Amino acid sequence: MTRTSRVIVSEKTLEMNICAEFLPLIRSFPGCQKSFWIGMKQRQEARNGLDELISNVPSGFHLMLQFKAPKSPSLVPKGFEFTLNDEQLRHLVRLANRRPEAVHYVLPHYNRFRSIRQDSPCLLQQTYLLPVEQLKGLAASSNKQGTHKVITEPPKAAIYSDPVEVELLSPGRMFQAILDTNMRERSLLTHEELRTWLREMFEQEKGNARAIGQRLRGLGTICVTDLY
């Protein structure tokens, strides 16, 4: 395998750097100054996941973000290519059915460190959100891997193998739409909705720690808390 064919920018690297920009932006909205990110370690993913992590979190609302890393530039001649796991997607769709505006894939257009260095600290200019709600009618994957291929060419993306065309959102515009004081309670997930979803996932996966870990990989929540 050549150096250029490897995925050299991991989901965790993108998650950490993108969240470093998400949080100041979200905290700039009235009543969101105390917001914070909740991520997961691999061990927590495979055991109790977010349910353990949010048990003692103060009152607030949740914005669920599923980070994905693009494939190596040598493997994609045009645009950026991401892979969505079908089983993980089905769980996220169930959550998006509760609050469509609160569940998104995060698709950063960074698969080389030199690009990250060049754009830092403004990585949001090349980061896009794919609302999971747009994928609820997507047919189950037909390949052996149980995956869907996503090719992004903003402001659109195509999901294969159908293909299905979907809209991409900019983080700034999306946050503006849902974090207004009057919209927050209608747009974001409550603690109980999130815990119920996790309990249902554990039941559907029959407590299989490995499967649960895979479903929660790259997933986290921004807890949007009130100032007082």
Image (tube, grey):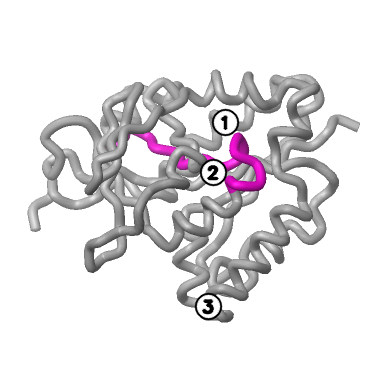
Q: Which residue is disc 1 drawn over? A: 22
Q: Quadrant of the C terminus?
A: top right
What residue is rendered at 81% in x and 25% in y? 31
Coordinates of residue 192 in the picture (x, y in percent): 78, 55
* Residue at the image position 29 percent from the left and 42 percent from the top: 159
> Relative to the observer, which residue lies in front, 44 or 137?
137
The earlier-in-sequence mark between 3 and 2 is 2
Amino acid carrying label 1: it is Phe
Dot 2 lies on which element? strand
Identify the residue position indicated by label 2 in the image: 65
Q: Is residue 100 magenta?
A: yes
The part of the chain drawn in magenta is 96-112
Amino acid at pointer 2 = Leu
Which mark lies nearer to you, 1 or 2?
Answer: 2
| Whether residue 142 can be seen here | yes
Type of residue at label 3? Answer: Ala
Q: Is residue 206 left or right of residue 153?
A: right
Who is closer to the viewer here, 106 or 158? 158
Tag 3 and tag 1, C-beta contact below 8 Å? no
Q: Residue at x 73, y 21 (%)?
A: 180
In this rendering, is residue 148 above or below 109?
below
- From the top left corner, tell me how far across and down residue 24 is, in percent: 63, 26
Does the magenta segment cover residue 190?
Answer: no
Tell me residue 202's x, y (percent). 60, 72
Left or right? Give the position of 169 relative to 48. left
Which labelled disc corresponds to residue 81? Answer: none
* Alpha carbon distance from label 3 to label 1: 30 Å
Answer with the quarter of the image where residue 110 lies: top left
Q: CA distance from mark 3 to mark 2?
A: 21 Å
In the displayed structure image, the side of residue 56 where residue 207 appears, left or right: left
- In contact (CB < 8 Å): disc 1 and disc 2: yes
